[in-house]
Image (spheres, rainbow, N blue to C red):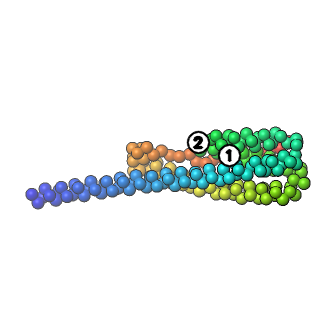
Amino acid sequence: MKKGLIVLIAVIAVIAIIGVWVSGTYNSLVSSREAVDKQLSVIDTQLQRRNDLIPNIVNTVKGYTSHESEVLSDISNARAKLAGAQSTGDVAQADNELSSALSRLLVVVENYPALKADTQFSALTDELAGTENRIAVARKDYNDAASSYNTMVKTFPRVIFANIFGFSPVEYFEAAPGSEQVPQVNF
């Protein structure tokens, strides 16, 4: 009787240890995924901040330039694409298009000294530069969280539980192909 009780206690202890380990593994996967989602929302917040600044910049530029409609149109189209992006990859691509259009706009501004001297335009571009820095930091933080999560999801033995519970790797926030090239602006 005593031997059977010891075996029963040992079996219950092993089951309890396995249960605690499985729940701890599951909880760490959930926490890591939440960290990724949080960082993605920080990117979205900063992209929205930039998106809200752009109409003010465009309207200020419109007041000084009347024949730069192509650049302004590209900015509007890129903003619309960013607003409709669903996946991380789509957001990254739309963000890159918008950044490229904004770069072309800032090159166009060089031809309008009065616009460059405008205090409202200067304040808006300073705010835009700060927002761009925040976006860069948010992308880095997201990619760090995504790397940690993806490592967790792909390493043994967590990969077993990740597959069982439906955790899959996430996309990194990457620059679009060709984004290392300086945008060309022709007048």
**Residue 159 in the image: x percent, y percent?**
42, 47
- Mark 2, Cα crowd under 10 Å, few <14 / some 14-19 / many 20+, is few
What distance separates the C-alpha of mark 2 from that of mark 1? 12 Å
Q: Secondary structure at mark 1?
A: helix
Disc 1 marks a residue whose amino acid type is: Asp
Q: Decide which of 98, 67 is in the foreground and name it.
A: 67
Q: Which residue is mark 2?
A: 87
Q: Is residue 182 visible?
A: no
Residue at x-position 52% and y-position 55%: 35
Residue at x-position 49% and y-position 51%: 33
Residue at x-position 31% and y-position 54%: 18
**Residue 122 in the image: x percent, y percent?**
81, 58
Q: Is residue 153 visible?
A: yes
* Corner quadrant of residue 25: bottom left
Q: Decide which of 113, 18 is in the foreground and name it.
A: 113
- The answer to whether residue 161 is left or right of residue 46 is left
Disc 2 marks a residue whose amino acid type is: Ser
Q: What is the quadrant of the C terminus in the image? A: top right
The mark that comes first in sequence, 2 or 1, is 2
Q: Are marks 2 and 1 in contact (CB under 8 Å)?
A: no
Q: Decide which of 61, 87 is in the foreground and name it.
A: 61
Q: Which residue is mark 1?
A: 95
Q: What is the quadrant of the N terminus in the image? A: bottom left
In the displayed structure, 62 sits above or below 18; it is above
- The answer to whether residue 114 is left or right of residue 99 is right
Q: Which numbered tag is attached to residue 73?
A: none
Q: Secondary structure at mark 2?
A: loop
- The answer to whether residue 104 is left or right of residue 163 is right
**Residue 160 in the image: x percent, y percent?**
39, 46
